Image (cartoon, rainbow, N blue to C red):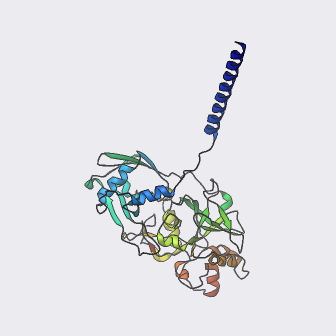
Amino acid sequence: MMVFAAMRCHHLRHLAALSALAAMTNMARAQAPDVPPLQTNQSYVEEMTRTTTLAIGDPLAVFAFVLNSLPDQVNVYPTENYYYFRFSHNGTPYAGNIALDPVEREQGKLRFGYFKEQTEWREAEAETFLLLDASQGVTVERLERLVYRVTYGGKSVVFTLNDLSAVQAPASVVGPDDKFLGTVFDESAVRFFLLFNARLKIFHYILDETVKPTEEYFASARVDRILIGRRTGFAFYRDHRLDRKILIGVFESNSRLNNYFDGPFDQLPENFIESEALRDAIVASDPEIKGRIDRLGNYQDGSGRYVIAPYRLYRKHDDLYVFHRCATDRRVPHADYHRCFVMDDEEQERANPLPAALKALATPARRPSGARRPGSGR
């Protein structure tokens, strides 16, 4: 009897220990940070080999598919108010977006487009595009500031736009001649401060380091002042004069493929640009554009938007070294130093393009460095 009691006591202690261990395990799981989602080749293969049914040639049917696939509420992170999506249909990858333009959304309209994803080995194919409103059964309702409900065919989705109006660039990154135009949230998940140097009449995208980094940066092999994003390919230069990193390069292939890493030129802070600040800056940098754009930089003839992309589209890391060469060149006037981080379209067409400050030394008569050719929305 005493042996049985001892065995029972030992069993109870064992159960208690197991219960304590389970509790500790559950507590550890609750306290552990979120683990990353796992992506497998199996899921990719099954997605590509799956037979799907979708009237891909009917834009309204595709819009219904996209809207019905979304949860009841979504966040639109890019500051140009584009909600991007991707899907595969019978082995073909597609990409697209729902755009809530600041003017059109107040008129009950939205833009919807989709296309076969671009590749390096095939010419880009035409995008299917629609401007949707109540005439096609699509309603866009303003619920509150920067919150809109989109409804079609009995399905409603609330789109919450990214409100960065309270985010200001730290004084440490704004030079004495700089005007802060707004905070840019790029679809790459990288944030920038858009600055305009009123004296030099040039734009800069400055990396926003007030938030948690969304990628890892590594130094160029030739000079540690050039930092390149391992995920995005965005290249920055550590300013000699201010505690900031200036965007100097976007990988050329990403720009050509029009993917998430094609640069911040199309993600301007539309929702919180003050009055005429952006248009005034564009016209100051390129007087020929006066009278041709609205306050948000859109061409009045509807052909697209004035593109602000003062960085280089590079192919190799060595392509970026010219910015450092300019920044350390004693021939560059002290007052022109920040022109070393601007390169215009015309110059990029040359075999060995130069930043604006070096170009000025070679050719005094030049086109304004802030000027860009017209761009198009996605």
Q: Quadrant for the C terminus, please.
A: bottom left
Q: Nearer the viewer, residue 377 or 303?
A: 377
Is residue 86 at least partly visible in the picture? no
Q: Position of residue 337 (x, y in %)?
A: 68, 74
Report the front residue among 170 and 132. Answer: 132
313 relative to 129 in the view: left or right: right
Q: Is residue 252 above or below residue 80?
A: below
Q: Residue at x 31, y 57 (%)?
A: 54
- In screen coordinates, is 301 left or right of 307? left
Instruction: Locate residue 176, reporting x and y percent.
Output: 66, 65
Q: Residue at x 66, y 61 (%)?
A: 173
Place of residue 113 in the rendered image (x, y in percent of width and height, measured from the top left): 37, 62
Most extreme residue toward the top, as rendered? 1
Q: How many marks?
A: 0
- Left or right of 194? Residue 238 is right
Is residue 193 found left or right of 267 in the rendered image? right
Viewport quadrant of the N terminus: top right
Q: Is residue 204 above or below residue 149?
A: below
Q: Is residue 52 above or below residue 301?
A: above
Q: Which quadrant holds residue 168? A: bottom right
Q: Is residue 24 visible?
A: yes
Foreground residue among 68 and 248: 68
- The percent coordinates of residue 160 (x first, y second) are 45, 49
Q: To which quarter of the image does residue 172 belong?
A: bottom right
